[in-house]
Image: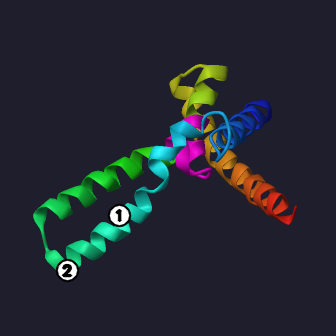
Amino acid sequence: MIETLIITVAFCLGWRIITDNRNLLYFVRKPFEDIENQIEMNEALYEKLKSPIIKNRIKVLKTKLYFAKPFVLCITCFGSLWGAAVYVALNGIDINHIPNLIINSIAASFIQTYIWIKFEKLKHDF
């Protein structure tokens, strides 16, 4: 269980770093980075105009954000998608593995978020 957790955290942190700004797979992350800003701008515009087209655009943007967070945007959310994928790749899937899969995903989320915050602080200190 500990080995799987370490590999999960390492994979998620590696995925976050490699998709970070100015890194190899940034092109995967780039289309989704500004979605939150677009949602805020469209919500402000909707308040003024009350257009159903703008409301529909907000709905589409929120759906994109919902799927993008665990895939490429949110280090904490990575534990849900990537944590489960790594666990299944290493241990297989069986009904008896589900509690361990859940524990692995939650623990990985906490650990990788803590490490990422420390990494970002260290990166900005230099």
Residue 39's tag is: 1
Q: Residue furthest front?
A: 22
Type of amino acid at the residue the image marks with label 1: Ile
Residue 48's tag is: 2
**Viewer-closest of 12 and 19:** 19
Please state the horizontal and vertical placement of residue 6, each as a whole percent of the image: 78, 36
Residue under the image location 59 percent in, 40 percent down:
26
Q: Is residue 99 above or below residue 60?
A: above
Please state the horizontal and vertical placement of residue 19, each as a whole percent of the image: 62, 40
Magenta highlight on residue 24: no
Q: Give the left or right position of residue 46, taking residue 99 as reference.
A: left
Q: Secondary structure at mark 2?
A: helix
Please state the total of marks drawn on the protein image. 2
Magenta highlight on residue 77: yes
Residue 101 found in image quarter:
top right
Q: Residue furthest right?
A: 126
Q: Secondary structure at mark 1?
A: helix
Mark 1, other Cα within 10 Å: few <14 / some 14–19 / many ≥20: many
Give, as a single range, the part of the protein colored magenta.
70-83
Please state the horizontal and vertical placement of residue 76, each as a whole percent of the image: 61, 52
- Compute the Cα span from label 2 to label 1: 14 Å
Please state the horizontal and vertical placement of residue 4, each as a whole percent of the image: 73, 31
